[in-house]
């Protein structure tokens, strides 16, 4: 059974701040992290991922909405960037190697993760991005892990969120 182990909220006042939060995550996340992103269109999922790509090694990240998956290598860790936006993507996602991307070395980011929730393994870092104003977003970070005491990667992700910079701080 999956349970929420920690909740942390951060307010981003601009796309530049969302990018900076992503860059911090890219520098800090350990190999094997699955980052599930959810939020409305324009909420900042790709902006956050762009920052993660910068933190991992300056990867040029763009939305993989029509390609399903982009792989970036050569930096601190590889970045596997997936998108489940289009209807029926869950079947294509699994058929085209999604399980390998999710469990691979490096960092895997899945945009529109709610659409493929049942196929996402634990532990995972779940981030919901919510519009507050045209420029401001609330980012809700959750570590989802197996029922029982957190161990291994789950505990590392819990500690990561404990160090996540506060609202208004520069990461």
Image (tube, rainbow, N blue to C red):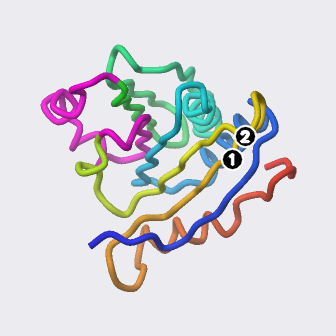
Q: CA distance from mark 1 to mark 2?
A: 7 Å
Q: Position of residue 69 (x, y in %)?
A: 34, 25
Task: Give whichever of 158, 5 is nearer the camera.
Answer: 5
Q: In the image, what residue occupies the spot 44% across and 38% down?
A: 78
> Label 1: how many residues lie within 10 Å, few (<14), some (14-19) or many (20+)?
many
Count every numbered label the image shows and give the total. Answer: 2
**Whole-percent x, y for residue 116 in the image:** 28, 42
Within the image, what quadrant is residue 60 found in?
top right
Q: Is residue 89 magenta?
A: yes
Q: Which residues are magenta?
A: 86-115
* Disc number for residue 49: none
Q: Secondary structure at mark 1?
A: strand
Is 97 magenta? The answer is: yes
Q: Nearer the viewer, mark 1 or mark 2?
A: 2
Residue at image mark 2: 132
* Residue 41 shown left or right of residue 148 in the figure: right
43 on left or right of 83: right
Q: Determine whether the residue tagged by mark 2 lies in a helix, strand or loop.
A: loop
The earlier-in-sequence mark between 1 and 2 is 2
Q: Residues within 10 Å of mark 2 (few under 14, many from 20)?
A: few
Question: Which residue occupies 42% across, 46% down?
Answer: 106
Task: Please give the name of the residue rendered at 48% of the width and 56% of the height, measured from the top-left corner.
Answer: 125
Q: Residue at x 60, y 71 (%)?
A: 159
Query: Does the CB distance between marks 1 and 2 fall below 8 Å?
Result: yes
Identify whether 59 is placed above or below 131.
above
Residue 102 percent coordinates (x, y): 30, 45
Residue positioned most to the top: 66
Residue 83 appears in which quarter of the rendering? top left
The residue positioned farthest toward the bottom in the image shown: 149
- Residue at which label 1 appears: 138
């Amino acid at each position: 059974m999956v349970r929420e182990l920690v909740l942390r909220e951060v307010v981003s006042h601009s796309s530049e701040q969302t990018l900076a939060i992503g860059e911090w995550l890219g520098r800090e996340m350990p190999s094997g992290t699955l980052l599930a992103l959810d939020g409305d269109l324009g909420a900042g999922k790709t902006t956050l991922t762009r920052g993660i790509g910068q933190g991992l090694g300056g990867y040029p990240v763009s939305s993989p909405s029509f390609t399903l998956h982009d792989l970036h290598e050569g930096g601190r860790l590889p970045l596997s960037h997936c998108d489940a936006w289009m209807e029926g993507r869950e079947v294509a996602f699994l058929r085209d190697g999604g399980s390998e991307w999710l469990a691979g070395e490096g960092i895997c980011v899945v945009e529109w993760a709610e659409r493929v929730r049942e196929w996402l393994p634990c532990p995972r870092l779940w981030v919901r991005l919510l519009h507050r104003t045209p420029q401001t977003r609330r980012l809700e970070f959750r570590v989802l892990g197996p029922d029982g005491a957190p161990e291994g990667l789950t505990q590392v992700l819990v500690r990561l969120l404990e160090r996540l910079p506060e609202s208004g701080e520069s990461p």
